Structures are given as structure tokens and as C-alpha cells.
Image: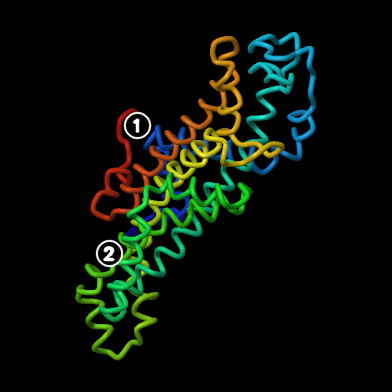
Amino acid sequence: MTSISATPTPQKSSLQIVLGMLWRDKFATAAVIFLLIAILCAILGPALFGDIATKQNLRGRNAPPFELERGFMMILGADALGRPLLARIIVAAQNTLTIAAGAVALSATFGAALGLVAGYGPRWLGNAIMRLADVIMSFPSLLLAVIVLYMLSPSVGNVILVLAITRIPIYLRTTRAEVLEVKERMFVQAAQVMGASSSRIVFRHILPMVIPTLVTIATLDFAFVMLAESALSFLGIGIQPPEITWGLMVAQGKQYLSSAWWLAFWPGLAIILTTLSLNLLSNWLRIALDPAQRWRLEISHKGGK
């Protein structure tokens, strides 16, 4: 009697599964690669290219792009003071992404916390929190930021704080709506019957169900906050020189649009590509974090095998 030994199928790790799902969406893969490059520029850019980005060369004022005889750093041209645009875009990535990440992190943290209280706490407290959100949302976010920054100094910290305050209601209202729906499910009611504390129910059972929605919203909101910061810098009440952001570079190049279009074009292109990448990544996250739609990414391609 011959015994047949079956070879066990190797189990894939969670990282391999996620990377596999990401690879099957080529647009999301390209978006992640671009965002990783932008993050590397934000981390390493000031240390590697900080001196080059601030060194003036009046002989190269408004130098046009693609003149390689001036050196690789001048491939995108130079600004009105002869500073290479490529180096300045790389260095400016730090402030631009730091402001967007800080504002999204603060607004998501406080908004989610208030939303959990409003959805699971006493009714009167939830109503009070929602009225506070209504007050914040009654002001246009950009107008509120303009008013506050006009009274405060336009530093990186103040810009992060102002933009975070204007975005809190988004996470608050979303979290509250999710909590009101999740707390009526059978597993939450079972935990209540078994005597679980409110904090355990909220953080162990409800919050994990809300996080995927918040992650998707935060990815989209990151792009919005970055555009809002660029708008504030364009209006002249955002980050001020010698600090630099992509929005400030666009603002500084607007007066040269007829004679040196590249001064505003390249930083504007960086904003567009980053925003587009975030939107593509958000669309992938919406599918990957939804168990009802995740199968679209988990199925293996059989063609060509």
C-alpha cells in the first residue's frame, strides 16, 4: 500500500497578500511609488539639497528648463534669483507634506474621538458635540483659515492647527454615523449583555469597524489639505520666505507666467501629481478595506500561465 504525501501549500504573509492586491491595481501601484518618492524627498531633501536650493545665481535668473549644459539640477530651470527649481521642489516637499500630514493627523484624531463620544455617549452630550461641529462648518474652511492666519503669524505650526480645526467636523460626523450603525449590531449587543465596559466595547469592538472608513477619508483629505495650504500660500498668508512650499513657489511664479512659465508650472505639477496619486490610493483602499469588494483584488490572474 503506497502512501501519498501531499505537499502543503505555503501560506502567504499578510504583507505578501497586501502587496499582491496592490500590484493587481497598476494605477494604485504607480501612485504608491510616486508617494514614496515624495516622502523620501521630504525626509532627505533638505539635508541633501538645502544649500543648493537657497544658493542664488543672478546670472541664471529665470533660466529655461532642459538646458543640461548648466548642470542636472537646472533641468527644470531656475527661479527669479537663479535658484534651481528641481532642488527647491525637492526641499519644499518637506513643508508641504508635513503641513498636510500634521493637519490630517490632528483632525482625524480629535474628530474620531469626539465622534465616538457623540455616537456612543449620552444623547445630550452627542447633541452638544454636533452643534459645535455645525458652528465650525457654518464658516467656509478657507475663509476661516484666512481670518485666523491674518491674526496669527503664518508659521508651519499655526497653518497645521488652523487647517486641522477646519477639518475636524468631517471625521466627527463620519465617525458618529458609523458608531450609530455599528452599535446596533448583534456582537456589540452581546458584549453589552456579557457586562463589557463601555470603553472596552468602543475601543475593542466599534473602533476597528470605523477605522477603514476613516483611513479612506484621511487619504482623500490629505489631498484637500495640501490644496488648501497651497491656496493660502498663493494668497500670501501661508508659509512665508525663507520657508518654502509648493504653493508658495506657484505664488512666486505667477507674475512671470508670460515670460517664465516654468516657475509656476513645475511646483503646480508636483501638487497635481501628488493629489492624483492620493485619489488613486484612496480608491484602492476603499476596495481593499471592504470585505465585500476585496475579492476583486484577491483573485489571481490565470491568463498567461
Instruction: Give the structural element (helix, strand or loop) at label 2.
Output: helix
Tell me where residue 205 appears, x and y as whole percent. Answer: 33, 74
The amino acid on which the numbered mark 1 sits, given as a three-letter code, is Lys
Residue at (57%, 43%) from the top-left corner? 97
Instruction: Give the structural element (helix, strand or loop) at label 1.
Output: loop
Which disc is residue 305 wearing? Answer: 1
Answer whether residue 266 is visible to the viewer in this image: yes
Q: In the image, 16: left or right of 174?
A: right
Query: Where, quadrant-wise, is the C terminus in this rendering?
Result: top left
- Which comes before the other along the chain, label 2 or label 1? 2
In contact (CB < 8 Å): disc 2 and disc 1: no
Residue at (56%, 41%) from the top-left corner? 237
Q: Nearer the viewer, residue 223 or 230?
A: 230
Q: Quadrant of residue 55?
A: top right
Q: Residues within 10 Å of mark 2 (few under 14, many from 20)?
A: many
Q: Quadrant of residue 267?
A: top right
Q: Nearer the viewer, residue 258 or 281?
A: 258
Q: Residues within 10 Å of mark 1 (few under 14, many from 20)?
A: few
Q: Tell me: residue 67, above or below residue 266.
A: above
Query: Where, quadrant-wise, is the N terminus in this rendering?
Result: bottom left
The amino acid on which the numbered mark 2 sits, given as a three-letter code, is Glu
Residue at (60%, 29%) from the top-left corner? 249
- Find disc 2 in the rendering and name its residue: 178
Q: Tell me: residue 183, above or below residue 297.
A: below
Residue at (37%, 58%) from the top-left corner? 136
